[in-house]
Image: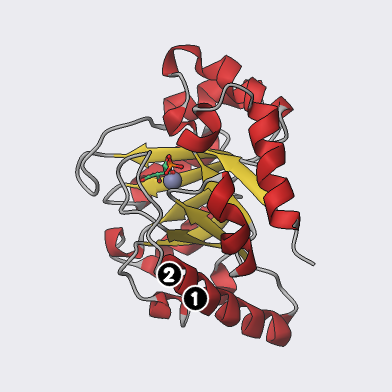
């Protein structure tokens, strides 16, 4: 039985009141804090780095889920680990040595993950699953909040879940499947049915006046 987790993406939070926003979603039933790192190089937008991760760390006891949209990947990993990150994921296209980057994340005491853009093949998982704790499927092209969910990603989620289930049968180890982009109350049930257990939602949560109500509504749709 999967444990379902909602991960508010602080990309859509009010950055002028970030500590308070993190506390509010943490108290409203979130399971992870999703932290989007963009470098204006790998993706066409620029956001936040390890200093901001360190600044929000005292405001929540939830794991901080750092989604790196940066190139190169490796040199920023130790900085995020020191800043209090718990999970670090990166895009395989942005790393010259994927196996090494995954190892580096674990060596620094964090859980590791690979992120797949909508058109990126899941075959990157073939030889590294032992070093992966979470697979993150992008259901929009990375760079911005507030985009629409790409419907083809439901089939990709089913395929990813099938791979992860096969791996679990062999090893007994559960690898989380997370999705990011365009997740709303009205599609989250379908996405869960496709095998996703961890749901990033930015604009849907921070654009709603009542964080507790919107997170509860998401869980209710998943459980339906
Ligand atoms: C996009 C980011 C997402 C973004 C999702 O590149 O990785 O985490 O915040 O935002 P919504 O939920 O608004 O699509
Ligand atoms: Zn993200």
Residue under the point 41% across and 54% down: 149
Residue under the point 46% across and 34% down: 203
Q: Pick the quarter of the image with the N terminus.
A: bottom right
CB atoms at circles 2 and 1 under 8 Å apart? yes
Say which residue label 1 marks: 128
Q: Vertically, is 23 above or below 128?
A: above
Q: Vertically, is 63 above or below 52?
A: below
**Quarter of the image holding residue 138?**
bottom left
Q: Residue placed farthest to the top in the image?
A: 16
* Mark 1 residue element: loop
The answer to whether residue 184 shows anywhere in this view is yes
Colour style of the rendered protein structure? secondary structure
Where does residue 60 sit, x and y in percent of width and height? 67, 27
Comparing marks 2 and 1, which lies closer to the viewer? 1
Where does residue 188 sit, x and y in percent of width and height? 58, 54
Q: Is residue 8 left or right of residue 181?
A: right
Say which residue label 2 marks: 99
Where does residue 120 sit, x and y in percent of width and height? 32, 70
Residue under the point 52% across and 42% down: 201
The answer to whether residue 31 shows anywhere in this view is no
Q: Is residue 189 left or right of residue 52?
A: right
Q: How far apart are the alpha carbons under marks 2 and 1?
A: 7 Å
Residue under the point 51% across and 60% down: 113
- Which circle's residue, 2 or 1, is located before the other in the chain? 2
* Classed neighbour count for the residue bearing mark 2: other residues with Cα under 10 Å, few (<14), some (14–19), many (≥20): some
Q: Ligand 1, what quadrant?
A: top left
* Classed neighbour count for the residue bearing mark 1: other residues with Cα under 10 Å, few (<14), some (14–19), many (≥20): some
Where does residue 104 sit, x and y in percent of width and height? 48, 57
Residue 9's disc is none
């Amino acid at each position: 039985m999967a444990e379902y987790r909602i991960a508010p993406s602080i990309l859509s939070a009010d950055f002028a009141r970030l500590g308070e926003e993190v506390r509010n979603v943490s108290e409203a039933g979130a399971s992870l804090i999703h932290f989007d790192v963009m470098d204006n190089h790998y993706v066409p937008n620029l956001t936040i780095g390890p200093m901001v991760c360190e600044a929000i760390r005292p405001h929540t006891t939830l794991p901080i889920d750092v989604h790196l949209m940066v190139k190169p990947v490796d040199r920023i990993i130790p900085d995020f680990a020191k800043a209090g990150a718990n999970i670090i994921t990166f895009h395989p296209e942005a790393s010259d040595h994927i196996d090494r980057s995954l190892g580096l994340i674990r060596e620094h005491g964090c859980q590791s993950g690979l992120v797949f853009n909508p058109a990126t093949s899941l075959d990157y998982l073939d030889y590294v699953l032992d070093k992966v704790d979470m697979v993150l499927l992008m259901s929009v092209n990375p760079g911005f909040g507030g985009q629409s969910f790409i419907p083809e990603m439901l089939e990709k989620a089913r395929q990813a879940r099938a791979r992860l289930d096969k791996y679990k049968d062999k090893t007994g180890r559960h690898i989380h499947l997370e999705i990011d982009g365009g997740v709303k109350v009205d599609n989250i049930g379908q996405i869960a049915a496709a095998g996703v257990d961890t749901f990033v939602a930015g604009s849907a949560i921070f654009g709603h006046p009542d964080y507790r109500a919107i997170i509860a509504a998401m869980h209710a749709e998943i459980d339906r």
